Image (cartoon, rainbow, N blue to C red):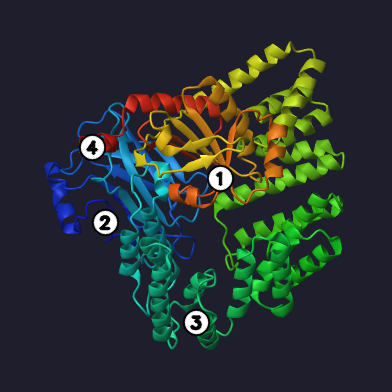
């Protein structure tokens, strides 16, 4: 098994096996003491000459191994999650192939993305038997170019013990004590671990509860830490990352930390960072903008001021202010591709200076390309990021071209990228361009794709499709609906969706809908509950609401409940209800504590809780086809039977 020379000595698994023991085991297959290995054992993060990042990761499974749970597999799949699973395509299910020697091999494409950590388990699909490394799951740490464990990798490993990965089928419940243990093992002043301090303190506060007593204890530790490292500077910047966002840290402690940073790191403007943090914490939009302007005026040369300028560029509405901010950003960093891109976005949002916006998009695309060709560039963007950027710029360009009545150019912009489309918005723009350019047949095909994929353009696409269908005399409305249903079924079949059934105890909740209905978890025992977290500003959330309402009507035996943050303006919710025709959907407003209890990071998040109060299914992100996916989920839960934890609890 090949590995890069600088990390060949690392055995990533698994059950930890010394290299000598591993070599001895290969002479007699019956002596294997491990179940899985990865190659390379510690993949390189990012790109640095002379060693490039690997393009793929190989996972080998040894059913003949002593610790293997699956002894005679007929077919195996790999369930792998990168980092914390937050980014698109970080949750993978891949097939294994059996080699002639009886070892099973799965190839994981790394796609040029700068991953830092991976965790995986192996499943025999026929028997649904899972090898999860005796409940610990298999892990893959990523390294720097010298073969040392990357600190970001350590941070993600610690985060895996906060319960966040349970949404992706990783049965690793919340254990803040273990997360702290992982971090402390890698914090060794003054040589390594200085970027792990803020995570360490965050988890300590979580472990002991965010109480006055816990804050007092942690504050004492913070003061000691600042005193111990004022001279060597270890971890001071990451300490500021924590304290700047805590309103309970006294000003005098903050001042001591800031002075220590100013002494040791004069180029890092700590006071500017504090102002930036205040702006980020501020919920009132007008006050937030005022704080960003204050930062720009007080510390114009600070890199934190540049971050404030970038935020302001997307928030302010006065075109002269926008152009002033843009000129400042380009002067300070002429190679930053996001500055012209953001300025183009502001022009498009205001529907002003659209030809200039096209030129700005050209400039942004050239700068992204230049960053790839220039090996001395300050930032090397991962291939996956560049691919996504190219598509997003093309979509914005096509939108502007359509506004300028140049549909032919919009088609030429989008058509080469069609294979990369995933959202309904992409297909809607292409369909509109094709229709305006006179290609009605191709426009209908694109509109159908826009309708069957989630996006905020679904209603517009549906209306445009129906009008064009009838105008072209292609059949009745029912015939059109039949075509849409066939396409939905094809998409669902090609996705080969396999629900991951979980056994996570659901926290208690007590909700009151906008209609005054009380939904308490204790009173919902005996019923399945579909719980959906969404937001009025979330483009992926809104298209799911009507299908959720329809699903409730189809399944009166269960309860569908949707939740928005308590700070959401009721008028905005009512506007969504009107436009989406949500006449019976249960909608509740609740504090951010509830999604935090569930470890539901971001929106949308859709869960199915069984009759015993266990989370059995978790969709983190949008659901391509709500009805079909949830139907498959219900069947999978029925096939899996009651949660074993519930059975054990009942037995006690």
Q: Nearer the viewer, mark 3 or mark 2?
A: 3
Distance from Cα at disc 4 to Cα at disc 2: 36 Å
| Callout 3 secondary element | helix
Looking at the picture, tell me which residue is in the foreground, 128 or 31.
128
Distance from Cα at disc 1 to Cα at disc 4: 33 Å
* Residue denoted by label 4: 648
| Callout 4 secondary element | helix
* Residue denoted by label 1: 603
| Callout 1 secondary element | loop
Taking the image as shown, residue 585 lies to the left or right of residue 136, namely right
- Report the residue at 65% width, 42% height from top: 539
Q: Nearer the viewer, mark 4 or mark 2?
A: 4
* Residue denoted by label 2: 11
Q: Identify the image quadrant of residue 643.
A: top left
Q: Earlier in the sequence, mark 4 or mark 3?
A: 3
Return the x and y of residue 283 as percentages of the image width and height. Answer: 64, 60
Return the x and y of residue 8 as percentages of the image width and height. Answer: 30, 59
Looking at the picture, tell me which residue is in the foreground, 197 or 330.
197
């Amino acid at each position: 098994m090949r590995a890069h020379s600088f990390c060949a000595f690392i055995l990533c698994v698994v059950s930890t096996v010394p290299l000598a023991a591993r070599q001895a085991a290969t002479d007699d297959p019956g002596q294997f003491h491990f179940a899985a290995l990865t190659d390379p054992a510690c993949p390189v993060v990012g790109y640095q000459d002379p060693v490039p990042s690997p393009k793929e990761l190989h996972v080998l499974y040894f059913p003949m191994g002593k610790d293997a749970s699956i002894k005679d597999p007929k077919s195996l799949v790999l369930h792998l999650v990168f980092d914390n699973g937050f980014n698109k395509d970080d949750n993978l299910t891949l097939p294994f192939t059996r080699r002639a020697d009886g070892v099973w091999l799965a190839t994981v494409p790394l796609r040029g993305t700068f991953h830092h950590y991976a965790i995986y388990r192996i499943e025999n699909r026929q028997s649904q038997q899972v090898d999860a490394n005796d409940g610990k799951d298999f892990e893959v740490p990523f390294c720097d170019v010298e073969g040392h464990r990357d600190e970001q990798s350590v941070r993600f490993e610690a985060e895996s013990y906060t319960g966040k990965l349970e949404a992706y089928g990783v049965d690793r419940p919340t254990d803040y004590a273990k997360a702290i243990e992982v971090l402390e093992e890698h914090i060794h002043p003054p040589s390594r671990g200085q970027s792990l301090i803020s995570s360490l303190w965050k988890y300590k506060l979580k472990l002991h509860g965010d109480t006055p007593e816990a804050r007092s204890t942690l504050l004492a530790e913070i003061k000691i830490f600042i005193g111990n490292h004022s001279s060597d500077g270890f971890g001071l910047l990451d300490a500021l990352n924590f304290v700047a966002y805590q309103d309970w840290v006294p000003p005098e402690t903050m001042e001591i930390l800031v002075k220590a940073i100013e002494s040791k790191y004069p180029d890092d403007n700590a006071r500017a960072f504090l102002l930036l943090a205040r702006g980020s914490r501020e919920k009132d939009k007008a006050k937030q903008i005022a704080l960003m302007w204050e930062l720009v005026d007080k510390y114009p040369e600070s890199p934190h001021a540049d971050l404030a300028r970038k935020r302001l560029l997307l928030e302010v509405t006065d075109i002269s202010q926008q152009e002033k901010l843009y000129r400042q950003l380009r002067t300070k960093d002429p190679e930053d591709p996001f500055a012209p891109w953001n300025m183009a976005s502001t022009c498009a949002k205001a529907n002003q200076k659209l030809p200039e916006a096209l030129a700005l998009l050209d400039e942004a695309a050239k700068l992204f390309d230049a960053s790839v060709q220039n090996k001395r560039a300050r930032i090397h963007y991962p291939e996956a990021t560049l691919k996504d950027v190219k598509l997003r710029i093309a979509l914005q360009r096509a939108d502007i071209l359509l506004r300028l009545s140049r549909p032919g150019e919009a088609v030429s912009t989008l058509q080469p990228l069609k294979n990369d489309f995933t959202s309904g918005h992409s297909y809607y723009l292409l369909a509109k361009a094709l229709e305006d350019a006179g290609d009605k047949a191709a426009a209908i095909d694109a509109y159908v794709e826009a309708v069957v994929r989630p996006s905020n353009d679904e209603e517009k696409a549906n209306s445009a499709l129906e009008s064009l269908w009838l105008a072209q005399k292609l059949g009745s409305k029912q015939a059109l609906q039949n075509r849409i249903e066939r396409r939905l079924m094809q998409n669902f079949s090609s996705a080969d969706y396999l629900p991951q059934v979980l056994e996570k105890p659901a926290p208690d909740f007590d909700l009151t809908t906008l209609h005054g209905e009380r939904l308490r978890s204790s009173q919902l025992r005996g019923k399945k509950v579909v719980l959906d977290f969404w937001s009025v500003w979330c483009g992926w959330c809104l298209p799911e609401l009507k299908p959720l309402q329809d699903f409730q009507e189809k399944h009166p035996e269960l309860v569908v409940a949707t939740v928005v943050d308590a700070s959401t303006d009721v008028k905005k919710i009512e506007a969504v209800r009107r436009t989406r025709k949500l006449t019976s959907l249960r909608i509740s407003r609740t504090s951010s504590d509830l999604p935090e209890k569930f470890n539901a990071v971001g929106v949308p998040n859709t869960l199915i809780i069984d009759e015993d109060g266990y989370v059995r299914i978790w969709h983190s992100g949008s659901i391509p086809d709500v009805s079909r996916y949830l139907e498959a989920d219900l069947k999978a839960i029925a096939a899996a039977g009651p949660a074993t934890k519930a059975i054990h609890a009942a037995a006690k």
